[in-house]
Image (tube, rainbow, N blue to C red):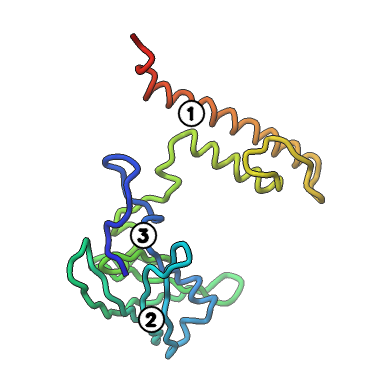
Amino acid sequence: MGGIGSGRHWQWGAKNTTADYRSIDVRRWAREGFLTPGRRFSWQWTADGEKVGSIDVRAEHGRVRLIYRSRDYGDEWESHDYPVRLLSQQCHYGGHREWFACPARGCGRRVAKLYGGRIFACRHCYDLAYPSQRQVGWQRAQRRADKIRDRLEWEYGSNWGFKPKGMHWRTFERLTAELEHFEHVSNVSFATAFNQRFGHLGEI
């Protein structure tokens, strides 16, 4: 699999985000039954239908062992084979939930996801932001508007449509009002940001 640092910054000095790194999710592995001691499997990542990375995993009692190779920026391939502890938490309504214990030295945080670089570690160890944290104001407002469209079952970019079957009119009216609000906020914020950055180009 590829090494760390393969992500792209949106702007100088910006943090990488969790979307820039390949990740493993203990919740998904638990749902798939992959954490049964003795289970062996291969986990892959794809892009445009092509495999871009993979690791071999062996489930053991109270931990999983990760086996893979990595390299950074054309360096020689380096082999890795190390355990990641599993932490089990009892749920209030029965059953239990599994977590990874971050294997980075001095960490050990209880996390659901680990992100792959030279080793797999939590987002705190790699100082990763969530993608939404790197969005500017108009992008956040547009993201809220798009989520409302999803609830209304309207096409992307549409500001008008029919009430979804089974939705109460009060809910429908509230959502359409919120959609109008966030679209307005997005448009105003975008215009302000555009003028701040490029407004000087029209000056003589």
Judged from the image, the secondary structure of the residue bearing numbered disc 3 is: loop
Choose top left, top right, bottom left or bottom right for residue 103.
bottom left
Give the residue drawn at x 48%, y 66%. Answer: 49
Q: Earlier along the polypeptide chain: callout 2 or callout 3? A: 3
Residue plotted at (65% across, 35% down): 178
In the picture, the quarter occupied by the N terminus is: bottom left
Q: Are marks 2 and 3 in contact (CB under 8 Å)?
A: no
Nearer to the camera, 201 or 178:
201
- Residues packed near mark 1 inside 10 Å, few (<14), some (14 to 19) or many (20 plus): some
Query: Are discs 3 and 1 less than 8 Å apart at CB?
Result: no
Q: Is residue 2 left or right of residue 186?
A: left
Count the marks: 3
- CA separation, marks 2 and 1? 46 Å
Q: Residue at x 61, y 71 (%)?
A: 93
Using the image, tell me which numbered label, if any, was put on residue 57: 2
> What residue did someone put label 3 on?
21
